[in-house]
Image (cartoon, grey):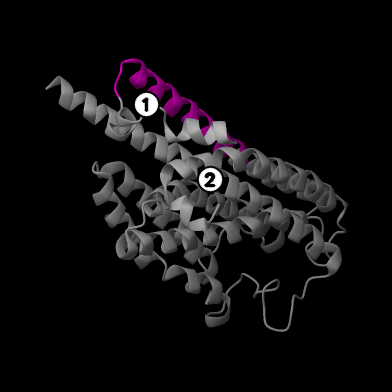
Amino acid sequence: MSEAAHTGFIIAAYAVAAIVVASLCAWVMLDYRAQRRSLADLERRGIARRSAAARPESIEQRAKEKA
Amino acid sequence: MAIADLANPARFLAFADRTIPWLGGVAVIAFAFGINQAMLAPDDYQQGATVKIMFLHVPGAWLGMLGWGVMTVAALGTLVWRHPLADVTAKATAPIGAAFTLMCLVTGSLWGRPTWGTYWVWDARLTSVLLLFLLYLGVIAVWRTVEDPSRAARAAAILTLVGAIDLPIIKFSVEWWNTLHQPASVMRMGGSTIDKSILIPLFIMTVAFTLTFATLVLAAMRNEILRRRVRTLRLIQASAAS
């Protein structure tokens, strides 16, 4: 098989790897946005976990402020 | 922060928020360096230029097995220690491990056609890796079909522990049976048989892919914790409405 034909296989392999990594990155980023949006929507409607309701300032907020 | 503190989901979220950008950044730098080294690597005396596919295929195989290894430890965490983040880890890792196993299978086929003259043979190594991919799909299916997260976690953990038997089969298949797939050449007794000019780019690409894997697993775990919070709030909303 010629070197040119090998190049096609190499490009195809790198394209597959790029698609796999890019798809995984897109999936986690879009999912993160979707979960954040859902949480913000629920909190806007005044729905809070019992632990969060007892302490209006969430642990995450405090951790972020601390950082 | 002690590692034990990360068992608390809120502390884990703060840790993930801080770590993901750095880990992702280091992975991008490692990829830039690794791809550069991979393109500069000489052709192999037998494989020719197709050796460049090995820089993707080997990390894919490693991460496919690492993913199941992580899930196996997490399964023990779910069933034995009932660790709060164990089932979150298992659920987050499954699609990522499946994707890297698929990458291993596809790039292996693309290497096999010019080198062996065929995309696929039913030898022990290839078949056991295909079985690993199918096991990943099985675990993902369990997570998606069982509605109660704790029941889904237990069912997925049992399937994961059973599936872990496939890991030593994959590793030793090339020694136990006659396979078209070559025997171990990187991690073997007596050291690697690969020349440094190819081994170094392979190592850098493996590090880059492993850093990407770690970043993706952390990000997916963060998403899963947030998804469980959303679920809890929706249950509170539903019970308040009824």
Kind of residue sitting beneath label 2 = Leu
Which residues lie in the magenta part? Answer: A21-47
Does residue A44 sit above or below B31 in this rendering? above
Q: The C terminus of chain B appears in which quarter of the rendering? A: top left
Kind of residue sitting beneath label 1 = Pro
Does residue B26 sit above or below B75 in this rendering? above
Residue drawn 54% across the image and 54% down it: B101
Disc ID at residue B68: none
Q: Position of residue A34 (x, y in %)?
A: 44, 25
Q: What subunit carries mark 2?
A: B
Query: Which type of secondary structure does the marked residue at label 1 adopt?
Result: loop
Residue B190 vs residue A2, the one in the foreground? B190
Q: Position of residue B232 (x, y in %)?
A: 28, 34
Residue B59 vs residue B216, the one in the foreground? B216
Residue B78 vs residue B93, the one in the foreground? B78
Q: Is residue B10 magenta?
A: no
Which is more foreground, mark 1 or mark 2?
1
Q: Is residue B182 visible?
A: yes
Q: Is residue B221 visible?
A: no
Q: Position of residue B47 (x, y in %)?
A: 78, 63
**Residue bearing mark 2:** B218
Query: Which type of secondary structure does the marked residue at label 2 adopt?
Result: helix
Q: Position of residue A4 (x, y in %)?
A: 82, 46
Residue B153 vs residue B37, the one in the foreground? B153
**Residue bearing mark 1:** A56
Spatial CA span between label 1 and label 2:
27 Å
Q: What subunit carries mark 1?
A: A
Report the residue that reaches farthest toward the left. B242
Residue drawn 26% across the image and 49% down it: B150
Left or right: B221 in relation to A3? left
